[in-house]
Amino acid sequence: MLQDCWENLRQKVIHHLNLLAGYETQPVLTGEVVVYRTSGRSNPAKSTAISLYSITRADESFGKLSREASLRNGKKTKHDGVETTTYGVVFYLEADFGTPGAMAVKNRGRREFLLKSVTLEVSENLSVHFDCNSWVYPIIKTNSDRLFFANTVSCSVPLICAIATARPVSLHHHLAIDVFDHRATCRVRHQQPCRASGKRSSLISEGTEEGRGRNGNAYMTMTATMIWETQTKDIIMRDPYWEEQGATHTLADAEQEDPLAIKVQHRATETRKKVINLDFYVPPDDRFSPVKLSEFISNSIRAIVHFVIPEVKSVFEGSIRNFESFGQMRKDLYSSHRRSILEGVVMEKLKALLPEEFIKEVVRVVKENPLKFPIPEVIATDENAWMSDEEFGREMLAGLNPAVIRCLERFPPVGRGGKVSSITASHIEENLEGLSADQAVELRRIFILDHHDYIMQYLRRINEQGVCVYASRTLLFLRHDQTLKPLAIELSLPGDGKGGEINRVFLPASQGSERALWQLAKTHVAVNDSGHHQLISHW
């Protein structure tokens, strides 16, 4: 409350000073400032000031700069579904100020804030928009204001030089830091690995302990800071280490319309002992928006809780635990029943692999929510809906490997070495809607999912591990309602003789042991399809 009163008093004093200075009795220019609402950040309205640069007028040696204006009357809003706060701002300008085209934002607070945009209403027919989407860090960390240009800025290079020169900023503020370290306040625009070479490389390596690393890969980082050397009209970069060597490197010509300062960061020799280090540096302007970041964290935690932790646990237990029944599967995966799996060695191993903040979030989610998947829609109303042939065809087409399904060109199918499939016309013609096998092939209505030839050569080695895998061929029929329905499944094993095979054909069935065998055959097809996706499609 006291701070609000002080801010109101300050605004009134500024208003009267503007009147005494000969400015117009009414605000010359009003604007709207939009800031993303981020948890744990300070309120920018109480500590932020904005000044405008004229894009059409310049003083003798500096860009024409307005007085500072503070943010006022913050209101909670939303932009594109993201929570924001919208502030008003009022500028008192000189009569000959001209059109604003750049602004300097000064953050006197202790924490950074994410500035979305600023819109200025210059007149009834003219508005100036600044599309920022960038973090504004406290001035105590950067020793300089943040400069933004309007979207429609078009001016000469000398005027840009004047605006840049007016800012109390030096190269030291943004680039004079350790060559192995990024600061969060660095405004990185582009990062690309390059090879250090020539005189610059030798200067870096002389008299240094990290010569091997510095002579290796380097990172060239483009920043948004414009540094002008008016005497030579060049953009130059000075680094504390390089200045000790008596070297100053010209990086770009000042006559470029969009010059950028360049910083070279050399990578030191790898000394980390961790197997995985997920603490990567991400430039502030390239980080996720609040909504996308929240969604990413939520999905990542769910993936760890539902997949990584059970997999790690099964590895440490040294055995593969299967579900004993469909009832147990539904209970353990989709019900509110909770299993305590974040204990002992599992959590200790994860702590060594994941950042501490991520582990804390995982533990919190586990305590607050059951470790369950959402119930799939296909079994939400009917637990047995997944067993139908129609659903089998739908999931195959909408699943992991739809591109593997191809039109059958000849019947019966022929594999590697000219081996003919065991599927015959009598197996399938009952379900071809009155067509013969040859007619259905000619009309391009029979399709095949072939996981036979590439799996067959590995089956002996796989099945020696105590599991049972079959090579499979699946024939599907395109019905009049444009859905795929399985016609037959052929499962194959290597024979005793050289090059021989043991084949068995399974057909659709709705009851008895034939129905159970048909469901088991479809399961083997799904296993092969998943393996193809993981081992071949990804590869």
Image (tube, rainbow, N blue to C red):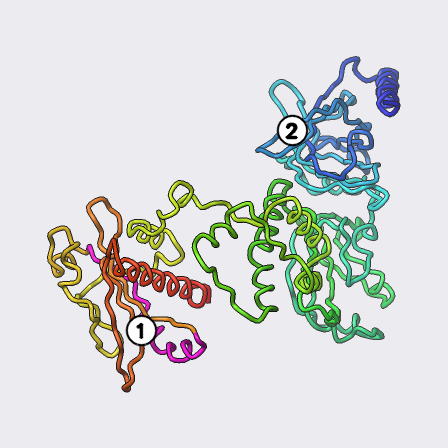
**Label 2 Cα neighbours within 10 Å, binned few <14 / some 14-19 / many ≥20:** many
Q: Position of residue 417 (x, y in %)?
A: 24, 79
Residue toward you, 460 or 198 = 460
**Label 1 Cα neighbours within 10 Å, binned few <14 / some 14-19 / many ≥20:** some
Helix, strand, or loop for circle 1?
Answer: helix
Residue toward you, 516 or 398 = 516
Task: Give, as a single range, the part of the protein colored magenta.
Answer: 445-466
Quadrant in the picture for residue 262: bottom right
Task: Tell me whether the residue at label 2 lies in contact with that at label 1, contact meaning CB atoms closer than 8 angstroms.
Answer: no
Q: CA distance from mark 2 to mark 1?
A: 65 Å
Q: Mark 2 vs mark 1: give the one in front.
A: 1
Quadrant in the picture for residue 462: bottom left
Q: Which residue is mark 1?
A: 453
Residue at 66% of width from left, 28% of height from top? 119
Q: Which residue is mark 2?
A: 128
Q: Position of residue 124 (x, y in %)?
A: 62, 18
Q: Position of residue 169 (x, y in %)?
A: 82, 45
Helix, strand, or loop for circle 2?
Answer: strand
Q: Is residue 457 left or right of residue 416?
A: right
Residue 453 falls inside the magenta stretch = yes
Amino acid at dot 1:
Asp
